[in-house]
Structure formats: C-alpha cells, structure tokens
Amino acid sequence: MTEVNRSTDVLGKSRIFTPEVINDIHVKSELGRYRMRGFSIFKKIPHWDELVFLPGTLTRFVIEGYREKCDTKTVIGSRFAAKPLELDVPVYITGMSFGALSLEAKMALAKGASMAGTATCSGEGGMIPPERDLSTKWYYQIIQSRYGFNPHH
C-alpha cells in the first residue's frame, strides 16, 4: 500500500497526537489491521549517525584531548553477584535465539562480541555449542515461554 498523506483539515487537529499518528490511525482503520514497516514497527528507528559524543564531558578538563583516556569498562552485578559480568564496552549483543538467526549469524555475533570485550545473550531458545565456544562472556535468557527453562541449552 502506498503512503497516504492527508492534510490537517481532513485529519483534524489534536493537542495529544501528531499529524503522523493521526494519519496512521486513519490508515489502520481503512486497512482493518496494523500497518507493518521495517522491523515490524511504525516508529522512526534511531540510527548510529544520530549518536554524538562530547569528549569534554566524558573526562575532566581537556588539556590535550588525544591523550586523555576514556575507560568504557562496565561491571554488572558488582554489589550482589558472586561473579559479576565485566564488559569492556557498555554494549552487548541482545537475546536472539538460534532459529531467529542462522548458525553463521550466531557464531559471527559471538566472535564479534568476544573481540569487542562484551557479552552475548542466548535468546529464548538457548545457546548452541559453537556459540558458547566463541563467546568469552555470555548470559542465559530466562523467560516464561513455550521453551521453558533448561540449563543445558
């Protein structure tokens, strides 16, 4: 279906909803279902180009910016965990189970996470042995689902 843009005269004005949201409501009512867009959602997806680092605020007063060290190490569970998870960067590979991703994709993400010094998550379906072998840091996702919980995944 092509994108339909209606004027605010047709859509009406609202103090709560933007014209884009009102347009989406009208399109959904005509379709009789939700619209699907990239990643199955309609909202705008953030992009890496929108990320801005302000180096002067990450450290003390910058005298020679190229010589200042910026440590991104993050420790998860330092207060209560017997074995806290230490990450070199505060970013990790989120839970995507085998089946949602191919074997090659799971292995590539595990290897990349290990190279970056971060962790990977099992996802709902557990981890496959090659992924465990390539991951230096990983955690197991436990949720209420049809898969249940199996510590041997």
Image (cartoon, helix red, strand yellow):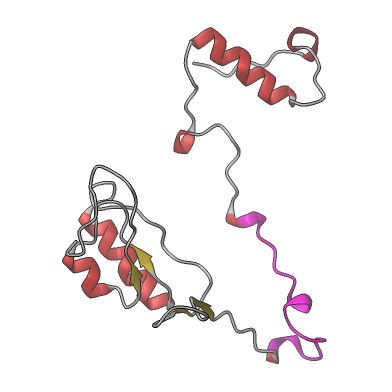
Q: Is residue 44 left or right of residue 121?
A: right
Magenta segment: 49-66
In the displayed structure image, the side of residue 53 where residue 110 appears, left or right: left
Q: Quadrant of residue 21?
A: top right
145 in relation to 107, above or below? above
Q: How many marks?
A: 0
- Does residue 141 lie above or below 18 as drawn? below
**Most foreground residue, 90 or 108:** 90
* Residue at (69, 25) in percent of width and height: 20
Q: Position of residue 146 (x, y in %)?
A: 24, 42
Farthest residue, direction front: 80
Left or right, 17 with respect to 141, comes to right
Quarter of the image where one finds residue 150: bottom left
Q: How far from the left and from the top, in percent, is residue 132? A: 23, 70
Q: Is residue 20 above or below residue 128?
A: above
Q: Residue at x 50, y 67 (%)?
A: 91
Q: Position of residue 89 (x, y in %)?
A: 52, 75
Instruction: Tell me the quarter of the picture where residue 73 sits.
Output: bottom right
Residue 51 located within the stretch drawn in magenta:
yes
Foreground residue among 104 and 24: 24
Residue pictured at 49% horizontal, 16% vertical: 1
Q: Nearer the viewer, residue 67 or 34?
A: 34
- 18 magenta-colored: no
